[in-house]
Image: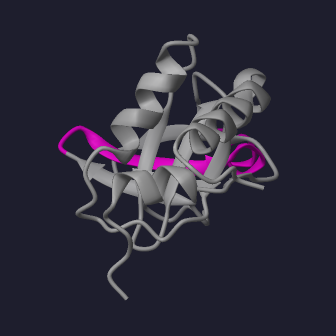
Amino acid sequence: MDGETNLTKLLSSMRPILREGEYVFCTLPALGSLDLDPVGFFKEEEGLTLILARPQAEAASLPYSAIFAMITLSVHSSLEAVGLLAAIATRLASHGISVNPVSAFYHDHLFVPVAQAEAAIALLHELAAESGTSSP
């Protein structure tokens, strides 16, 4: 299954879900012997970026600078889809909400400041409704 590429269909059927918990971005030179279960990670030249549940980061005494909520877009988007994250980032930015998107094989995940999570969900539902079918 390749996923959806039509922008109108993607936006109208994105069905955003606010996940439980708080998440943080941390960095390490390497994972080493820490017993962590990251939601995601990316290896950069400067070190390994980890996306962790906040309690894990605190238990491992890992510093972080901000706390995020995770929103998952339920639509199965193609990794080759054009414009979905641009439309979302533009809408959220127009309301002063930063977003750190992560695309995975089946879904896109949005990390927004915890204090703005409900506003972000409302804006995503508005965007979906404007694009066709209202998300539940």
Using residue 37 as the reference point, say whether residue 47 is left or right of it.
left
One can see residue 62 in this view? no
In which quadrant is the C terminus drawn? bottom right
Q: Residue furthest left?
A: 45
> Measured from the top left, where is residue 125 in percent x and y?
68, 40
| Segment tinted magenta in the rendering | 45-61
Q: Is residue 52 magenta?
A: yes
Which residue occupies 61% across, 24% down? 66
Q: Look at 65% across and 29% down and name the residue there.
A: 123
Q: Residue furthest front?
A: 132
Q: Is residue 52 above or below residue 36?
A: above
Picture residue at 39% right of the left edge, 73% below the top: 105
Q: Up-down: is 133 above or below 117? A: below
Q: Position of residue 26 (x, y in %)?
A: 51, 39
Would residue 88 be found to the left or right of residue 18 on screen?
left
Front-most of residues 117 and 28: 117
**Would you say 45 lies left or right of 60 here?**
left
Quarter of the N terminus within the rendering: bottom left
Q: How is the image coloured?
A: one colour
Nearest the viewer among 40 and 107 is: 107
- Is residue 119 visible in the rendered image? The answer is yes
Rendered image quadrant of residue 64:
top right
Image: 36 above or below 27: below
Percent x, y of residue 111: 57, 39
- 77 magenta-colored: no
Residue 24 is drawn in which quadrant?
Answer: top right
